[in-house]
Image: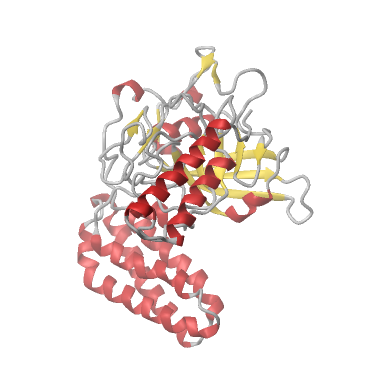
Amino acid sequence: MLCSGINREVVETLLRSLRLAAHRLEKRNSFSWKECAVSVALSVGLINGAPTLGSPAYASPLEPVLPDVSVLISGPPIKDPGALLRYALPIDNKAIREVQKPLEDITDSLKVAGVRALDSVERNIKQASRALNNGRSLILAGLAEPKRANGEELLNKLAVGLEELQRIVEDRNRDAVAPKQKELLQYVGTVEEDMVDGFPYEIPEEYSTMPLLKGRATVDMKVKIKDNPNVEDCVFRIVLDGYNAPVTAGNFIDLVERKFYDGMEIQRADGFVVQTGDPEGPAEGFIDPSTGKIRTVPLEIMVDGDKAPVYGETLEELGRYKAQTKLPFNAFGTMAMAREEFDDNSASSQIFWLLKESELTPSNANILDGRYAVFGYVTENEDYLADVKVGDVIESIQVVSGLDNLVNPSYKIVG
């Protein structure tokens, strides 16, 4: 089981982080409360404890803890799981991104109180409409050939939907904006998925025979909430990203099809993460009945700009301190594999969901990015994760779509 704790090493790491930040500020003869806040945020993360197996759950990053403070304050992180998944797709089509961005910006526009927000929303709509009209041919050219007809139909629906959203704004119906925005972004996301033509890289030979998710899949996880009178049962929809974590996501889907998690209790819920996956008995992972041994998967991290994931080493160990991960720990409900703290390749079946958003620590600047394998995001009902407690039961996890993307499914092998 996993636990949280503070020991001497954590305190030393925390002090080292603060001293390093102070030293850099002193050298520049300047002082920034924002930079201090970032350092404190990182330190708080260390104290809260990162998910590990069989040892106290703290993180002990290698030196330097803060390689460059300027990286930490480069901009606000993307926290919406849908947006993170869209940007994580292996595509390069500027035209569709120029439609996507203003539609996503509607979320920020709606943060303004009252109907005044609708003026900003209207600007977002006009920008997206112009981008769609001007870039339509480039978007269509970027679609995989077998999916071009479907993509054209979706673009037509998107154009009509933008007109409908414009009328919603003209009618000053603020409450109807967000649902329509979600619908339009679903069209955009599907078009972008239709731009992916096959799996984009080769899996390393040593992992090529393992269960692999070569694409994406969606699962519904039904949890029985025991002690919350306001929530009895909750279904969390989770999108698994095999483009960026095929081995990790494939291992999980394979376990789902084995019903490994069905009936299992939540084993950690401390306000930092929700975690499960430790089976009964001495083993801390899935024992493959065909071998009688725990099946483990390697640490798998996809870096933005790389053509394939890196395996078996953290980004800190590789010295890639500024590298941006394609699947960052930015969203409330980010899903990742737990592992032993000092064994990068010890993950098996224990999974966790992060409950904290990255307000002060953008992608690549917190203690989790590049150290744990993210392989999906909760996209529906993620807020209810905060209500999940130790002892609540996973009634079932079922694959909704994408099972055909699973390669080498070991669950089909008897024994």
In the image, taking residue 38 as reference, residue 67 lies left or right, namely left
- Colour pattern of the rendering: secondary structure
Quadrant assignment for the C terminus: top right
Say whether residue 168 is visible: no
> Residue 12, how many percent across, how many down?
51, 35
> Considering depth in this image, is 45 or 331 the residue closer to the camera?
45
Residue at (47, 65) in percent of width and height? 182
Q: Position of residue 307 (x, y in %)?
A: 25, 40
Which residue occupies 39% across, 79% down? 163
Tell me the quadrant of the picture where the N terminus can be found.
top right
Q: Quadrant of residue 351?
A: top right
Q: Is residue 253 above or below residue 157?
A: above
Q: Relative to 261, is 194 above or below?
A: below
Coordinates of residue 87 in the picture (x, y in percent): 35, 54
User: Taking the image as drawn, is residue 271 in sight?
Assistant: yes
Taking the spot 37% from the left edge, 27% from the top edge, the residue there is 312
Foreground residue, 256 or 389? 389
Along the line of sight, which residue is nearer the eye, 331 or 236?
Answer: 331
Residue depicted at x 68% and y 33%: 263
* Image position of 318 with respect to 287: above or below: below
Image: 101 above or below 351: below
Residue lying farthest top? 292
The number of callouts visible is 0
Q: x, y percentage for residue 192?
A: 33, 56
